[in-house]
């Protein structure tokens, strides 16, 4: 019971800091600006293509491709995934590094809180911040749903993918932040690792055999793509949840080692 | 009496560098103990281990009966810690931070507001309750550091240099706050302001190069480790003859002639010299204007101990 309260204390403290510093507003502004821009251009492109298709003799193959999920939301999900690579380091770089740099870690870690309460509290706050931003993008399908028919199931799968991808990136970012006292270094390491996990699957295209298969399985992009297609596969769920747990666990080990090493 | 702090063979290495070497001490419940030592002596390291921030390389430390490593959460629940140069989240207000501390320390939701108000009143923080921590003066930040440590009324308070960097009036305020804690809490504080320690503490532990060199009440330390008593006397008479006559008294270790007929006489082994000194002066027909005993200050004891320790070690190293 006491640890739930402790966990909540960390979440609330982190949220208060997020909302009282400009980083959340700046990151959120550009995230929504870019997401809005891509949504708008996708919708415009979709309407032009639909209009042209309606004027020409109807081709069943073209008509099958002409639905808002394929033309608007799949490309939007793909681009949001890439925006996440750039955005997550800004959300997570401060989380652990700033505690160490400013010396507040000395108070935080002498309070009767378990390392898990601190780590998952910080992770939970960052995830909530991300979910708030993602919630704004939910207005896109809601508005589009007023004028056209949408496949809500596939959309839900896409959003689940975005939530899991975001959570995985945040867990990795938190770990990167725990490695250093310098926020910038924490951010750069997070970005580099995220990029690595994004493109690692490309090795398979070079025909690298079993090694290529392992790399492909480790790739965030490959697992995320299934969600954007509207497919929820247990393997992808397991991968994302294991990825999150693995990096939170590494963060915990990093904190423990500080206690012994420092 | 039950021990609030028990430290056995406590050792800490930073890489190959030895910071604390086989420390052994106990602090009884209700005591106010000063932890003294020059910079780099291992004070902060020891306090960080007690507070659960660092783990020892060897040995054990127990707070309120709980081991600082194996039962760290229970140990941390028993203490409030004020780190050196208290760093607090600058983007939170005083109230937001104290509420966070109360929740983190497991104060029940219903009692949270009352507890935050109590520590704010105890530390005089009401006037800045809505201010951002980043905008507080050093004195208020130090008080806030003390206030967060007092939340949930822990039986033990550990303070690392609680008055460092404060101006004289702020130092007096913080000392007063610490004095008010007497009886309700056990306090262990490190400092290098010696009068502060002799004023506040029941007992002093002096460490140097990671080892304890003395542990006693400030008065006993002054008496025992001052290596004898000192007498200050003022005599109207020829300076060289007076000095020679005093030096001839048995038990006198050294005579320092000062200006205007003042003489500082150091005794060999703490012997009471005043009757003999008075007799010698009167027998010679000089006038005895003043005669009083003077104790060694804690500062002198500290410097003696630390210098002695360093010199002995250097000699041993040279010999080997």
Image (cartoon, rainbow, N blue to C red):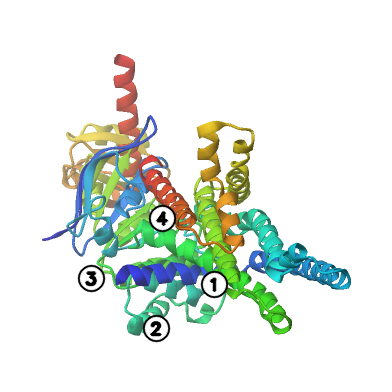
Chain letter for mark 4, please: B
Check disc 3 and report the residue beneath it: B183
Could you say where residue B275 lies in the image, as x and y percent from the top left?
Answer: 16, 47
Q: Give the class, few, some or many, for how many residues have Cα within 10 Å of label 4's Cα (few <14, many ≥20).
A: many
Chain letter for mark 3, please: B
Chain letter for mark 1, please: A
Mark 1 and mark 3 on one chain: no
Query: Label 1 to label 3, Cα distance in Å?
Result: 37 Å
As rendered, which of A182 and B209 lies closer to the eye? A182
Q: Earlier in the sequence, mark 3 or mark 2?
A: 2
Mark 4 and mark 3 on one chain: yes
Q: Which of marks 1 and 3 is in front?
A: 1
In the rendered structure, the answer to whether residue B112 lies left or right of residue B140 reads: left
Check disc 2 and report the residue beneath it: B113
Mark 2 and mark 1 on one chain: no
Check residue B161 in the rendering and tell me which mark sits there, or answer none. 4
Q: Which of marks 1 and 4 is in front?
A: 1
B126 over B275 or under it: above or below: below
Mark 4 and mark 2 on one chain: yes
Query: Label 3 to label 2, Cα distance in Å?
Result: 25 Å
**Do callouts 2 and 1 mark residues in contact (Cβ within 8 Å)?**
no
Check disc 1 and report the residue beneath it: A16
Question: Which element carries disc 1, helix, strand or loop?
Answer: helix
B311 over B295 or under it: above or below: above
Residue drawn at x 64%, y 57% is: A81
Question: Which element carries disc 4, helix, strand or loop?
Answer: loop
Q: Give the class, few, some or many, for how many residues have Cα within 10 Å of label 3's Cα (few <14, many ≥20).
A: few
Could you say where residue A157 lies in the image, as x and y percent from the top left?
Answer: 56, 66
As rendered, which of A87 and B122 lies closer to the eye? A87
């Amino acid at each position: 019971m006491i640890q739930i309260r402790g966990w909540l204390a960390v979440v609330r403290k982190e949220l208060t800091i997020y909302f009282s510093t400009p980083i959340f507003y700046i990151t959120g502004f550009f995230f929504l600006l870019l997401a809005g821009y891509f949504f708008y251009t996708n919708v415009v492109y979709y309407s032009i293509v639909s209009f042209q298709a309606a004027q020409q003799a109807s081709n069943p193959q073209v008509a099958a491709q002409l639905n808002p999920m394929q033309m608007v939301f799949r490309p939007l999900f793909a681009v949001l995934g890439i925006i996440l690579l750039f955005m997550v380091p800004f959300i997570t770089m401060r989380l652990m590094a700033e505690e160490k740099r400013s010396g507040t870690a000395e108070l935080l870690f002498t309070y009767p809180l378990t390392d898990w309460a601190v780590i998952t509290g910080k992770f939970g706050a960052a995830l909530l911040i991300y979910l708030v931003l993602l919630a704004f993008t939910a207005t896109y399908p809601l508005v589009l749903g007023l004028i056209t028919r949408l496949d809500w199931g596939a959309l839900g799968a896409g959003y689940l993918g975005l939530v899991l991808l975001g959570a995985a990136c945040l867990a990795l970012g938190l770990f990167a932040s725990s490695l250093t006292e310098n926020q910038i270094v924490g951010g750069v390491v997070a970005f580099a690792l995220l990029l690595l996990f994004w493109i690692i699957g490309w090795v398979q295209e070079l025909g690298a055999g079993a090694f290529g298969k392992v790399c492909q399985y480790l790739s965030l992009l490959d697992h995320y793509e299934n969600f954007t297609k509207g497919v929820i596969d247990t393997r992808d769920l397991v991968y994302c949840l294991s990825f999150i747990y693995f990096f939170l666990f590494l963060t915990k080990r990093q904190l423990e080692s500080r206690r012994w090493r420092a | 009496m039950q021990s609030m702090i028990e430290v056995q063979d406590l050792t800490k290495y930073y890489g190959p560098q030895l910071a604390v070497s086989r420390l052994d001490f106990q602090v009884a419940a209700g005591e106010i103990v000063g932890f003294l030592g020059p910079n780099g002596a291992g004070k902060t390291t020891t306090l960080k281990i007690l507070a659960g921030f660092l783990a020892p390389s060897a040995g054990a430390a127990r707070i309120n009966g709980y081991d600082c490593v194996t039962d760290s959460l229970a140990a941390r629940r028993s203490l409030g810690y004020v780190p050196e140069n208290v760093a607090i989240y600058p983007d939170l207000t005083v109230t937001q931070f104290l509420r966070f501390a109360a929740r983190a320390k497991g104060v029940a939701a219903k009692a949270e507001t009352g507890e935050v108000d109590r520590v704010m009143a105890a530390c005089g923080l009401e006037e800045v309750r809505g201010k951002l921590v980043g905008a507080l003066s050093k004195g208020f930040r130090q008080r806030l550091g003390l206030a967060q440590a007092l939340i949930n009324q822990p039986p033990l308070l550990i303070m690392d240099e609680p008055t460092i960097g404060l101006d004289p009036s702020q130092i007096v305020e913080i000392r007063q706050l610490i004095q008010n804690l007497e009886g309700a809490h056990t306090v262990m504080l490190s400092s290098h302001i010696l009068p502060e320690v002799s004023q506040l503490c029941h007992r002093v532990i002096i460490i140097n190069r990671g080892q304890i060199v003395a542990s006693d009440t400030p008065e006993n330390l002054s008496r025992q480790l001052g290596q004898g008593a000192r007498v200050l006397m003022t005599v109207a008479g020829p300076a060289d003859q007076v000095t020679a006559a005093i030096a001839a008294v048995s038990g006198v270790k050294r005579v320092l002639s000062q200006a205007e007929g003042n003489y500082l006489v150091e005794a060999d082994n703490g012997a009471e010299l005043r009757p003999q000194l008075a007799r010698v002066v009167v027998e010679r027909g000089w006038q005895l204007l003043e005669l009083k005993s003077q104790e060694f200050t804690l500062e002198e004891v500290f410097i003696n101990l630390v210098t002695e320790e360093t010199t002995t070690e250097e000699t041993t190293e040279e010999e080997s």
